[in-house]
Amino acid sequence: MTSATRYFIAAATASMMSLMTTTASAALIISGDNNETCTTTRPGGNGPAVSDCTPTLITPHVSWEPNNPLDNSNNPTGAEWISFDDTGIGHGQFDKPIAPFRGSQDNPTGHEFFMTIAEPAFTAKAGDTLFMKVWADDTARIYLDNVVLFDANFTQDTACADGPVGCEPGEAKALTITNLTSGPHIIKFDVFQFGTSDVANDNPFGLLYFGQVTSADVPEPGTLGLFGAGLLLAGLFRRSARSPRA
């Protein structure tokens, strides 16, 4: 076999292997990018029963997961804590907005969700995978297409929910949903306030999340044709190289 033949076979083999390898593409979903919508609910009648709100970036409590959490590849996501108003930590604690605390008219038991955050619909291909991580103070219920993926956790520690979905590092709820159907899908969160303090800085409230939709890129029919032709040519060159010379 000549050196030129060896080079061709090696190059053809490398090219075909690259065609056989599927590559993953990812779409990122994050809190704090101004794409989400917000509504608040006041079942006790202290204001409109349901009203629109503007998602607002807030300063997280020092015990919370910091802004800009890392994805599974240790890349910054850019996600930030949000709320219906400035309900994070900050100055002016006695005149800052506060989510209805447990025991108040609008939240007598702490089991009444106050804020709902919804992401715009994302379009998936059949077989796509959705991975998410979610933190909340005090906890949250997570939906995909109005189906509950994770219910609120009302077992609380001194900061928020004890474990997933809580607010502290290590208390995220990680979800992996495989084999998504083709078409649009909607992610939504109901956020709960379980704290009893009526002082804003003692009872902050918010939501942090990111999600990634990944899919395997399948070669186009034309690419598969080239792949087959490459196999055929490689076979012919190998056969020619093995044939005895006259």
Image (cartoon, rainbow, N blue to C red):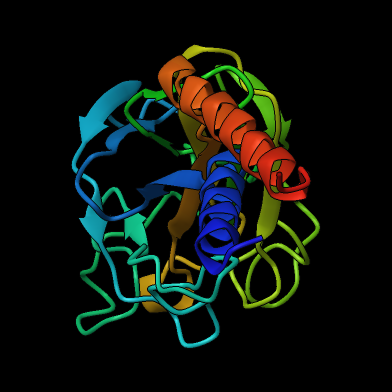
Q: 150 above or below 51?
A: below
Residue 33 position within the rendered picture, expressed as x and y whole percent measured from the top left: 23, 52
Q: Quadrant location of the N terminus?
A: bottom right
Q: 43 above or below 206?
A: above
Residue that appears at 28% across and 55% down: 32
Residue that appears at 48% across and 69% down: 203
Q: Quadrant location of the C terminus?
A: top right
Give left or right: position of 10 versus 80.
right
Residue 178 position within the rendered picture, expressed as x and y whole percent measured from the top left: 70, 32
Q: Residue furthest front?
A: 246
Residue that appears at 76% across and 42% down: 243
Q: Quadrant of residue 117?
A: top left
Q: Is residue 119 visible?
A: yes
Residue that appears at 58% across and 17% down: 126
Q: Which residue is at the front of the view, 150 or 104? A: 150
Numbered-mark total: 0
Give left or right: position of 195 versus 80.
right
Q: Quadrant of residue 201?
A: bottom left
Give left or right: position of 190 versus 91.
right
Q: 223 above or below 34?
A: above
Q: Is residue 108 visible?
A: no
Q: Which residue is at the front of the view, 144 or 28? A: 28
Q: Which residue is at the front of the view, 153 or 51? A: 153
Residue 225 position within the rendered picture, expressed as x and y whole percent measured from the top left: 50, 20
Residue 173 position within the rendered picture, expressed as x and y whole percent measured from the top left: 69, 55
